[in-house]
Image: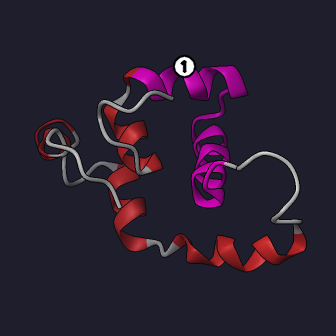
Amino acid sequence: MMFSSYMELYNLIVPEDNMLRRINDLVDFSFVYDEQDKYCLDNGRNAIDPIRMFKYLLLKTIYDISDVDVVERSKYDMSFKYSLGMAPEDSV
């Protein structure tokens, strides 16, 4: 759950018919958590949310860009940040 005073920016910048917004609104990504039991949860560093990691892979596939490019584009493309479930002011 995100609490940011800047969340309203998404309604101004990312149109309702944006493909990433529609995917985010229509797809329930909770199926990603079903795969989480295959990994050790008490070993190593805390991980980034598995759904966000899945969405990074989805963005890479949709836009045919590299790991570096998807991270770089997520810094300035508000539709990417919206899709990833990040607040506008969050760092990537």
Q: Is residue 82 left or right of residue 50?
A: left
Residue 64 is inside the magenta segment: yes
Residue 72 is situated, as x and y percent measured from the top left of the image, at 54, 19
Nearest the viewer among 25 and 90 is: 90
The residue shown at (57%, 43%) is: 59
User: Which residue is painted at 14% across and 42% down in the image?
Assistant: 5
* Left or right: 41, with 22 as reference point: right
From this view, report whether residue 38 is shown above or below residue 22. Answer: below
Magenta stretch?
48-75
Residue 25 drawn in magenta: no
- In this rendering, the answer to whether 49 lies above or below 91 is below
Decide which of 83, 42 is in the foreground and name it. Answer: 42
Q: Which amino acid does label 1 sit on?
A: Glu
- How many discs mark residues in the rendered view? 1
x%, y% of residue 48? 64, 48
Q: Residue at x 25, y 52 (%)?
A: 3
Disc 1 secondary structure class: helix
Vertical order, 28 against 3 (above or below): below
Quadrant position of the N terminus in the picture: bottom left
* Other residues around mark 1 within 10 Å, as few (<14) / some (14–19) / many (≥20): few
Q: Dividing the picture into quarters, in which one does residue 45 lie?
A: top right
Q: Is residue 30 left or right of residue 45?
A: left
Residue 67 visible (yes or no) = yes
Tell me which secondary structure the magenta stretch mostly adopts: helix
For this rendering, which residue is in front, 52 or 22?
52
Judging by the rendered image, the residue that carries numbered circle 1 is: 72
Residue 42 location, x and y as percent? 83, 63
